[in-house]
Image (spheres, rainbow, N blue to C red):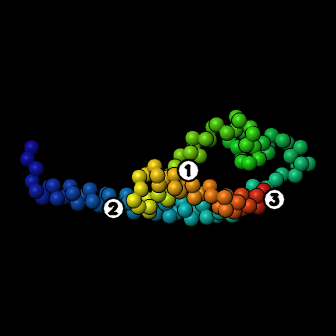
């Protein structure tokens, strides 16, 4: 079967059209989902009053994963989501390292993580987290 140049260019144009449509659709979906998550940006976890918790304790006890720091000592709640948390952390650190220049990837990640756990930063984050549990 012989392919004519016009057939090749039509196929390339069709490919470009499909690629452009997919890119546009994905961008729209990302923007739409990002907008939805802004609704929850001020969400917080509140302490349930003891009298309410006693009515139905199972309703207020996590079963799938830990809501740290409240349930950090419950080992069965730590393991199921650990790989997910690590994956998200790796994605976040990878995004932060994309703008850094001149270092190997491993060194970039170490630098970002060191900055994240700097004493002043940790204190601020800890204070912000404590506000959510008040």
**Side of 14 relative to 128 (left or right):** left
Local crowd size for mark 3, using a 10 Å CA cut-off: few (<14), some (14–19), many (≥20): few
Q: What residue is drawn where x is 52% and y is 49%?
A: 90
Q: Please tell me the numbered disc located at residue 134.
A: 3
Q: Position of residue 65 (x, y in %)?
A: 68, 42
24 relative to 56, above or below: below
Residue underneath mark 1: 89
C-alpha span from label 3 to label 1: 26 Å
At a point 67% along the width and 62% down the height, the residue shown is 120
- Residues tagged 3 and 2 counted as in contact (Cβ below 8 A): no
Question: Which numbered disc, 1 or 2, marks the residue closer to the eye?
Answer: 1
- Tell me the element at label 1: helix
Give me the residue at 54% from left, 60% from top.
Answer: 33
Q: Depth check: 57 or 25 in front?
A: 57
Residue 71 vertical placement versus 13 (above, below)? above
Judging depth in this view, the residue of 5 and 39 nearest the camera is 39
Crowding at mark 1 (Cα within 10 Å: few <14, some 14-19, many 20+): few
Q: Is residue 25 left or right of residue 61?
A: left
**x and y percentages locating residue 8 in the rendered image:** 15, 55
Q: Is residue 64 above or below residue 125?
A: above
Q: Where does the N terminus fall, quadrant-wise?
A: top left
The x and y percentages for residue 43 are 70, 60
Name the quarter where the C terminus is drawn.
Answer: bottom right
- The percent position of residue 116, horizontal first and vertical second, equals 59, 57
Q: Secondary structure at mark 2?
A: helix
Q: Which residue is mark 2?
A: 20
**Which of 68/47 is in front?**
68
Cα distance in 3D space between marks 3 and 2: 48 Å
């Amino acid at each position: 079967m012989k392919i004519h140049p016009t057939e090749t260019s039509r196929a390339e144009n069709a490919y470009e059209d499909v690629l452009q449509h997919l890119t546009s659709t994905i961008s729209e979906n990302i923007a739409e989902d990002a907008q939805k998550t802004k609704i929850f940006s001020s969400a917080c976890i509140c302490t349930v009053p003891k009298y309410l918790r006693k009515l139905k304790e199972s309703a207020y006890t996590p079963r799938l994963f830990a809501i740290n720091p409240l349930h950090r000592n419950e080992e069965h709640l730590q393991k199921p989501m650990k790989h997910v948390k690590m994956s998200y952390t790796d994605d976040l650190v990878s995004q932060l390292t994309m703008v850094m220049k001149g270092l190997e990837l491993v060194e970039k990640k170490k630098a970002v993580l060191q900055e994240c756990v700097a004493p002043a930063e940790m204190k601020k984050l800890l204070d912000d987290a404590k506000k959510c549990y008040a």
